[in-house]
C-alpha cells in the first residue's frame, strides 16, 4: 500500500514551504528533506535508503516524514559546468521563464544551495543541515538518532561545521563529540546518562558527530573545559568548582 509519508518533489522551495509542512505534522514526527545529487556517486547511499522507505520500510518508522528530490548542480559548483553557449534573446527569455517556474523534475532549496545534502527538522527552530562535503554513511544513523531523541531534551549538532557555528554564534552548553569509532550502544548509554543528570544541571547538552571522543564545556562561544573520553560526571564537577 502506498504511503503519503514519503514524497518526491521538484521545483524551487523556500524555508517557509517546509515550515508549513512541519506545522501540519504538528509535532507528531520529524521531517527530513533530502536532495540527492545526480553527479554524486556517494548519493546512491541516500537513494538506496529512500527506496527502502518507499517500499514500505517507512511504515516501521511512524515518527518520520520525508520529502526528497534530485539536484543537478555539479559537485564543484556552477564554475565546473561547460563553457557558456551564446543564446538568442528568445532563448534567454525562455530560460528566464523556466527559471522562474522551476524545473518540476529538479529540487532547489536555498538552505542547500549546492543541491547536495539533507536537513532534519525536529521543530521550527531545531534544524540539522548537512550539505557540501558531508559523510553520506551518516545519513541513516543521523535520522535514526533524531527519531530516538525526538521529544526528549537531548539535542544534536550537525557535525563539526555545526560545532563551529555553535561557537561563532556565541552559544553556551556542553557538547559531547563522538567519532566513527563510537559504538551506537555507547551513544545510547551516554544519552541515558544525560537524562539522569537533567535535574543536576541546567546546562543544555548536545551530541555532535566528529573525529574525537571528548566532552567540551562552551560559554558564549569560548571553550572553557575539555575532557577526553566520555567522563560527563568529571566535567560537571569541574564546572561546579
Image (cartoon, rainbow, N blue to C red):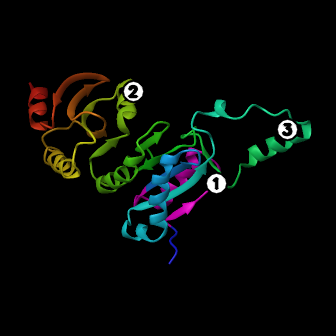
| Element type at mark 2 | loop
Mark 2 vs mark 1, CA separation in Å: 33 Å
| Element type at mark 1 | loop
Mark 1 vs mark 3, CA separation in Å: 22 Å
Q: In the rendering, which numbered label is found on residue 169?
A: 2
Callout in the foreground (2, 3): 3
Q: Earlier in the sequence, mark 2 or mark 1?
A: 1
Mark 2 vs mark 3, CA separation in Å: 41 Å
Residue behind mark 1: 10
Q: Position of residue 226 (x, y in %)?
A: 19, 26
Callout in the foreground (2, 1): 1
The reply to whether the C-beta atoms of the residues labelled 2 and 1 are less than 8 Å apart is no
Q: Residue at x 80, y 41 (%)?
A: 96
Residue behind mark 3: 92
| Extent of the magenta region | 5-30
> Would residue 141 be counted in the magenta stretch?
no
Q: Is residue 208 above or below residue 6?
A: above
Q: Position of residue 116 (x, y in %)?
A: 53, 43
Q: Position of residue 168 (x, y in %)?
A: 39, 24
Q: How many numbered dots are placed on residues in this image?
A: 3
Q: Is residue 5 left or right of residue 141?
A: right
Amino acid at each position: 500500500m502506498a504511503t503519503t509519508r514519503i514524497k518526491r518533489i521538484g521545483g524551487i522551495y523556500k524555508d517557509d514551504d517546509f515550515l508549513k509542512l512541519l506545522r501540519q505534522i504538528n509535532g507528531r514526527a520529524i521531517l527530513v528533506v533530502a536532495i540527492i545529487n545526480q553527479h554524486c556517486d556517494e548519493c546512491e547511499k541516500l537513494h538506496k535508503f529512500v527506496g527502502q522507505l518507499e517500499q514500505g520500510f517507512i511504515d516501521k518508522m511512524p515518527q518520520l516524514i520525508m520529502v526528497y528530490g534530485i539536484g543537478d548542480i555539479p559537485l564543484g559548483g556552477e564554475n565546473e559546468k561547460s563553457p557558456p553557449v551564446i543564446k538568442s534573446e528568445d532563448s534567454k527569455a525562455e530560460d528566464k521563464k523556466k527559471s522562474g517556474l522551476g524545473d518540476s523534475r529538479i529540487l532547489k532549496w536555498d538552505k542547500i544551495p549546492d543541491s547536495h545534502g539533507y536537513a532534519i527538522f525536529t521543530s521550527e527552530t531545531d534544524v540539522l543541515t548537512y550539505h557540501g562535503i558531508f559523510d553520506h554513511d551518516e545519513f541513516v544513523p543521523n535520522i535514526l538518532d533524531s527519531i530516538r531523541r525526538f521529544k526528549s531534551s537531548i539535542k544534536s549538532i550537525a557535525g563539526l561545521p555545526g560545532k563551529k557555528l555553535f561557537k561563532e554564534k556565541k552559544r553556551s552548553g556542553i557538547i559531547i563529540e563522538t567519532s566513527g569509532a563510537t559504538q551506537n550502544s555507547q551513544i545510547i548509554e551516554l544519552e541515558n546518562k544525560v537524562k539522569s543528570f537533567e535535574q543536576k544541571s541546567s546546562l543544555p547538552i548536545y551530541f555532535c558527530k566528529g573525529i574525537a571522543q571528548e566532552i567540551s564545556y562552551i560559554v558564549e562561544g569560548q571553550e572553557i573545559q575539555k575532557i577526553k573520553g566520555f567522563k560527563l560526571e568529571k566535567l560537571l564537577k569541574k564546572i561546579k568548582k
